[in-house]
Image: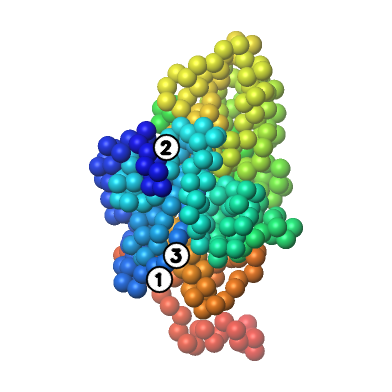
Amino acid sequence: MDYKEGAYKVRDLSLADAGRMRIEWAESRMPVLAQLREEYSQTKPFEGYKITGCLHVTKETAVLVETFAACGAEVAWSGCNPLSTNDEVAAALAEAGIEIYAWYGQNVDEFYWSIERTIDKPPHLTLDDGADLIFTVHKKFPHLADHIIGGSEETTTGVHRLRAMAEDGKLLYPVYAVNDAETKWDFDNVYGTGQSTLDGILRASSVLVAGKNFVVAGYGHCGRGVAMRAKGLGANVIVTEVKPTAALKATLEGMRVMTMDEAAKVGDIFVTATGMKDIIRGWHFVSMKDGAIVCNTGHYDVELNLKELAEVSQDTRVIRSDNREYTLDNGKKVFVLAEGRLVNLAAAEGHPSEVMDMSFANQFMAHLNLVQAHKRGETLPNTVIDLPEELDQHIAGIKLETMGMRIDSLTEDQIAYATDYSAGT
Ligand code: NRN
């Protein structure tokens, strides 16, 4: 490990060159962030503000971090999952002078130690994915909230929890729900999670997907993306759900729908994407076919009940990276990927740069909004705030431009027509 107090703690600084090349790769595929950096690095609106982030340390996150820094911000960063940090990228950020505490394979104490280092010097802004940073501030350092002008949350699970906190009046500062921006969830959650989850499964197993019974638990935006990409690879997709409308949508999109008790008996590959705990229980593992592959792509590692799996197993061993074989008491083998943590980031590199470009453009604009409001002396309400819808059209418009696509626009006459209630059929 390489550690410098108040500066960084990373696996190995000598990995920096390799990490820099990964970051350059991502940068070349994130044109929306590049345009924002071009525009705001002149005026440096974040000058004098410290942003503390707790979000997967990937090559894409590094581009966001360095965009904030280029626009004047002081930045401190930690990872938001013990298994999702790319050590090469972390080394490159440390070498570039970003305060960062992150390495692959942290234990729980190291994970929270890293978060706490990033707030040793109080931040003005917090940026979360899964709310571990904002929860740490609220639970252990509530006085810091006096110094914090606002925050943002990247992912569905985090936004759900923060909305609950706001409902109970417990939120100490305003937080933008970046996840709920259409140019985030309708692209990142669907196309990003769809591709990166299959990427994680293939890197950890190299299994043939075609012809396999592929069970997706949860048919929300993420589950829908995973199901779509599994189908594209030739799988027979089975969906389990608790929400009738989601289950109905899966049925009409050609997926089989059944309970997990039934799916456990026929599935070859299982992915949980529910945001809920205890989706696959001990008895499900017992009824699985020999050789079943099981993983999770939800934010927290609570969807597979590995405690109950251990209780019905006689042996376990890691047979290859991110692939743990369990030999059950009944003699059958089950393979759990990435220790039940989000397989797309733990066993692969998370979503592709092109889709994170839009998610992180929303992150950048959320914090720009917070800083500009602060400079105007405005105080925002201590609740979860949605980003303005026009921001979605702006971000999507830039993305289309960079993809060389042009679209039509409405004439004045058509705009008038849209709201003209006197017009008959
Ligand atoms: N490559 C990535 N870098 C990446 N892929 C997915 N995510 C990533 N963050 C940084 C996050 C998505 O935005 C994981 C979150 O849970 C999801 O909302």
Which mark is on residue 49? 3
Residue appearing at x 63%, y 55% in the figure? 142
Task: Say above or below: 161 vs 181.
Answer: above
Secondary structure found at label 3 = loop
- Cα distance in 3D space between marks 1 and 3: 9 Å
Disc 1 to disc 2, C-alpha distance: 30 Å
Q: Is residue 313 left or right of residue 354?
A: right
Instruction: Give whichever of 339, 51 is nearer the camera.
Output: 51
* Disc 2: which residue: 103
The crowd level at tag 2 (other Cα within 10 Å; few <14, some 14-19, many 20+) is many
Element type where label 1 sits in the image: loop
Give me the residue at 51% from left, 52% from top.
119
Question: Is there any visible trace of residue 338 in the rendered image?
Answer: yes
Instruction: Look at the picture and state if 166 lies above or below 294.
Output: below
Residue at 29% over, 54% down: 28
**What secondary structure is found at the residue carrying circle 2?**
loop
| 63 versus 297 height, above or below | below
Mark 1, residue position: 45
Please count the marks in the image: 3
Quadrant location of the N terminus in the rendered image: top left
